[in-house]
Image (cartoon, coloured by chain):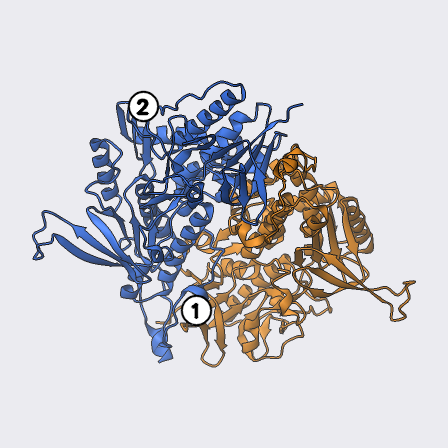
Chain colours: A blue, B orange
Amino acid sequence: MSKRKHIVIVGAGFGGLKAAQKLKKNDVEITLIDKTNHHLFQPLLYQVATAALAPGDIATPARAIFKNDDNVHVLMGEVSRVDKTAKTIHLENGQKISYDYLILAPGTRHSYFSNDEWEKHAPGLKTLSDALNIRENILLSFEKAEREPDPAKRKKYETFVVVGGGPTGVELAGAIAEISTKTMQQDYENVDTGLVEIYLVEGQPHILNSYHESLRDRALHTLGEMGVNVLLNSMVTGIDERGVEIRINDDHSTHESKEGSDYRFIETENVIWAAGNAASPLLRNLEVPLEKDGRIDVEPDLTVTGHPEIFVIGDAAKHVNNDGRMTPAVAPGAIQQGEHAAKNIVAALRGESHTPFRYFDKGNMATIGRARAIAEIRNQRFSGFFAWILWSVVHIFFLIGFRNRFRVMAEWLWYYITFRGGSRLITRRKMEEVLPPRNSAPEHVPESAGQLEFDSERNRQG
Amino acid sequence: MSKRKHIVIVGAGFGGLKAAQKLKKNDVEITLIDKTNHHLFQPLLYQVATAALAPGDIATPARAIFKNDDNVHVLMGEVSRVDKTAKTIHLENGQKISYDYLILAPGTRHSYFSNDEWEKHAPGLKTLSDALNIRENILLSFEKAEREPDPAKRKKYETFVVVGGGPTGVELAGAIAEISTKTMQQDYENVDTGLVEIYLVEGQPHILNSYHESLRDRALHTLGEMGVNVLLNSMVTGIDERGVEIRINDDHSTHESKEGSDYRFIETENVIWAAGNAASPLLRNLEVPLEKDGRIDVEPDLTVTGHPEIFVIGDAAKHVNNDGRMTPAVAPGAIQQGEHAAKNIVAALRGESHTPFRYFDKGNMATIGRARAIAEIRNQRFSGFFAWILWSVVHIFFLIGFRNRFRVMAEWLWYYITFRGGSRLITRRKMEEVLPPRNSAPEHVPESAGQLEFDSERNRQG
C-alpha cells in the first residue's frame, strides 16, 4: 500500500498559501511552516504602520485558514537548513521534517547594502512586528514633540524620512503625510503640522521605476501636493540616532565640487527603510548559485536546477518567462507561481511532466493617500480617485476572510470620513525609555491650545 | 486680571478621566498625564489577554477623548515626584509642571508580596502591554505544544495556572478554559484539549470573597464545569521557569504532617498573577503615611491630610464612608470619586467648602465564560445567562466611544457564535527565542490530524 506523498511548504505568504490551498484537494499530506503564526496581507502593511488599520485587519492565523483540512498541518517555526540529499528540512531547534516535495516561499527581508548598523535606526516594513514598531515610533515622536517646548529641539521629532521610492516608500510617505497633517493636527497642541517635514529619498532619477512615465509624474505631483519632499538622485550614505546623511548625485549641479556630489544631513528620529530587499538567507544553504540579491534563478518550471522536487517561488525566486520578461516581486507574481508549483507537483504525482511557468501581468497599482492612486492595467492607465476605488476593490477582494474584508472596509470608511485612524495606541514603550533627561529649568505647559507661552506661571516659579 | 487655575490630573484611568470630564466645563486649565497614551477599559483587559478582543476595542487615545477641549492638555509621561511645598510635579525626564490643584489617580500595580523575582515568570494584568504579553505567551504555548511529539514534555505547555481567586483571576481562568477547549481544539492537532489543565489558586477558603456566599458557590460550580481546577486554601510559595510550588493549608487534612501543610508542584510555563495589588510607588514621595499596600488613607473629602489642594482617588486611595464602609477598588468607585473630587475643586474655586465623599454601591458583577456570570445589585442576586446579559450591557455602556461599543458588540457576537476569537496573532516573538534546542533524533510530523504516529517516514530516515 503506497503512502501519501508529503509536501513541505516553507512560508505562509501569498505564494506558500496559494500552493497549500491548491494542493490540499489532492491525496497528499502538506506541512505549512511559517516564522509567524499568521498569513499577512503585505500590501496593506503600511496602513498598520501608519495607524490606519489594526494588525487583526490584515492578518489571519494560518491555522484558522486550514482548520477544516485534515491533510494540512500548520507549524510555527523557522527552517534553518535544507538537506537536499536526505530530503529533510531542519527547524531552528533541531527538529527535522522529511519531504517528498518542497516548496520554498520564504520571501525577502530588507537589505541595507552591507550597512547593517543602519537597521536599528531605520527599521524596514516586512512583518507585523515591523509595522507595530514603526507605528509606535511615529506616535511616540509626536508625544515627545508635545513634551518639548523648544521648537528647535522639537524638529527631529517632527521630521520623517522614508528611504526608497518604490511603491512601498511612496505609499508610506503619503500615509505619513496624511496622518501628520490631518489626524495629528486635531490631537496635538505644540506640534504645528505646518512644520512637520516628510522626505522621500530615492537614488534614481525617478520614483516608481516600474510604472509608466505619465503615472510616475502624477504620483510625484500628488506627493508634492501632500507636502512630501521628494529627493531624487539621492543616496543615503549614513544613518544614526541624529538623522540621515544623503549624497545628492546631480549631474546638472552648479556647485563647486566637480565630482557632481553634494551632501545633506536631515535631523530626524524617524527613518523608515523601504529601499532594498534581499532574499531570505535560508536559500544560501540550498547550495545552488544565488543572484546578487540572494534570490535563486529557477528553472522555467520553478524548480531548482537538478532538483525537480524542490520549488522556489515568490519574491525569493528569479524567474524569466520565455519571452524574456521577469516575474516582478509583487503579490500576483507569488500567487500565480504558487498555483503553478502546485500544478507541477500534481502533474508529477500523476507521472506527467512539469510545464513552464508564465507570468500574466494583470497590472500594477499604488495608492498615494486617501483618495488618489495610480494604476496601469494592460495598456490602460488610470490615476486619481477612480484608480483609488479600483485599488481598494482589488485589495479588499484579495484579503483572506470575510471578517477581514468587512473590517477593513469599515475601518477605511471611518478613516476616510473622519480622518481618524483607529489604531493609535502605544503599548510597547514608556516615555522614560525614550526621552532624554533635561535640566531642571522650570516650565509650564501652555495655557491654551496653540499658544506657546511661558508666562506668569514661570515667573511664579522663578 | 486673575489667571485661570491649573489642575493637574495624574492618571487617565476611570478616576482621572471622569475628573477631567467634569472639570473641563469650568474656567480652568487641566493637564492630564498618563504613563500610556490611552484610557484603558480595564474590566475587559482579560479578554485581550485571552485573544477574544483586540487592544483597540478597549482603549482610546486620551488625546482623542479631549480633542475638542481647548482647556484640557494631554501629556504622555510619568510623574516621578510631587513637591507639595512648591506645588509642582516632576516628570521622569526632569520637566516640572506646577499646579493649583492636584488629583492623583495612578491606580495600582501587581504586588508579589516581596517576591519580585516571580514577576518574570508570572506576569500580571494591568496594562495593554501586559495583556498582549500574556496573550502571546498563551498562543506560543500552544504552538510549542504542537511542535512537541512527546506528551510528557508537552504537559508544561498545556498547563495554565492563574494565581488569585478574585474577579480578575476567576474571569481569566474561565476565559482560558474557553479558548483552550473550544477555539484551540479546532486549530491544533497534537494538543488534546482534554489534557489541557487550568488551575486557579486561592489562598483563602473561598474565591470571590467580596460576593455573597450563594454567588461564590455558583461561580465555583461553573468553573468546575468548565474544567478549571480550583485550589483553595493554597498559597504560592515559589515560581520559576519550571512551574509553581503551592502550599496547601488544609485544617482537615488527613496526611502525616501535623503542621497541616502539604506542598504541591505544578509543572507549567504559563502562570498569570492576579493575586495582589499595591498602590503606585508615586504615592511614597507624597511623604504622608501609607497603608501596608501603599495606598493613602484619604480624608472624607478625598484630600490628603493637611493639603486640601491634593486629592487621591481610585484604587490608590483608601476611603471609608462615615458609615464605616470602604470604597472597593472597582471601576464605579474610581468613577464616583473622580466626580466628587471635581465637585470639591469647583466648590473651592467658588470659595465654598468641600463635602465628604460617599460611595454608592450599585452592585458587583463578574463573568465566568461565554454566557454565565454572577451579579449582585442591592440585595438582588443573579447568576447564569441573565446575569451575563446584564454584565455585557453594563460594560458596553461604560466603554468610551461609540466606535468601541460597536466593535466590542460585533466582536462578542462573532466570538460567542463561532467560538473564534479575532485576535490570535503572535507578533512579538519567534520560536527560536522560546523553544529549547533538542537532539537530532529524526521525527516526522503526524500524518493525519489527531494521530501521533512516527511511522514509515521515520524508518526511512533511520
Q: Chain of mark 2?
A: A
Seen in the picture, residue B353 relative to B65 is either above or below; the reply is: below
For residue A322, which numbered disc appears in the image? 2
Disc 1 packing (10 Å; few <14; some 14–19; many ≥20): many
Spatial CA distance of label 1 from label 2 is 74 Å
The local secondary structure at tag 2 comes to loop
Seen in the picture, residue B169 relative to B147 is either above or below; the reply is: below
Q: Chain of mark 1?
A: B
Q: Residue at x 46, y 27 (%)?
A: A341
Q: Check if mark 1 and mark 2 are on a common chain.
A: no
Q: Position of residue B172 (x, y in %)?
A: 67, 51
Q: Position of residue B391 (x, y in %)?
A: 67, 46
User: Which quadrant holds the N terminus of chain B?
Assistant: bottom left
For residue B6, which numbered disc appears in the image? 1
Q: Residue at x 32, y 32 (%)?
A: A365
Give, as a three-letter code, the residue at label 1: His
User: Which quadrant holds the C terminus of chain B?
Assistant: top right
Give, as a three-letter code, the residue at label 2: Asn
Disc 2 packing (10 Å; few <14; some 14–19; many ≥20): few
